[in-house]
Image (cartoon, rainbow, N blue to C red):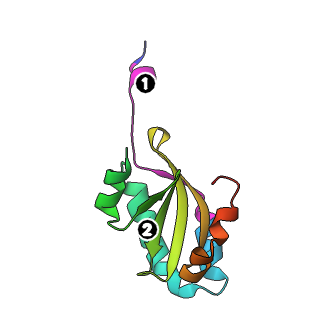
Amino acid sequence: MPYWQSAKIVCGMRIITKRKLVEFWTRGRSDAKQPLIEWHQKTEAANWSMLPDVRRTFAHADQVGRLTVFNIKGNDYRLVVRIEYQLHLVFIRWLGTHDEYGRGDWKNDTWY
């Protein structure tokens, strides 16, 4: 078997999709732009295989069912993602204010 078929090459996490982040900060949440860019860069560079790995990068990441919740810009915004560790994929499921998160708006997502 050729080496490229048997080797497992890991080059960080792949985020699906950055477009959701850009749409968020261009729709009146410009204060979230830099913190979201930083989250994106750190996540792309990460090699997570379980929640403790995530918490080494983002100490306040929380697991809620099959989803992971990140505080963005202190505690102003919440980012809800689904992480497929074995595939090194991060699916952005919901992004909103802390108040919207508290009302449970993110639970309307069909992936929850």
- The N terminus sits in image quarter: top left
Percent coordinates x, y for residue 103 in the rendering: 62, 77
Q: Is residue 99 above or below residue 63?
A: below
Visible residue check, residue 96:
no
* Magenta stretch, residue numbers: 3-19
Percent coordinates x, y for residue 6 in the rendering: 41, 21
Q: Is residue 103 above or below residue 8?
A: below
- The C terminus sits in image quarter: bottom right
Amino acid carrying label 2: it is: Trp
**Disc nearer the start of the sequence (2/1):** 1
Q: Is residue 33 left or right of residue 12?
A: right
Percent coordinates x, y for residue 92 in the rendering: 58, 60
For the point 51% across and 87% down, which residue is it?
31
Q: Nearer the viewer, mark 2 or mark 1?
A: 2
Percent coordinates x, y for residue 23 in the rendering: 65, 74
Q: Is residue 66 left or right of residue 47?
A: right
For the point 64% across and 81% down, which residue is it?
26
Disc 2 on helix, strand or loop? helix
Q: Which mark is residue 39?
A: 2
Distance (Cα) linking label 2 and label 1: 31 Å
Amino acid carrying label 1: it is: Trp
Image quadrant of residue 106? Answer: bottom right
Q: From the image, tell me which residue sits under label 1.
A: 4
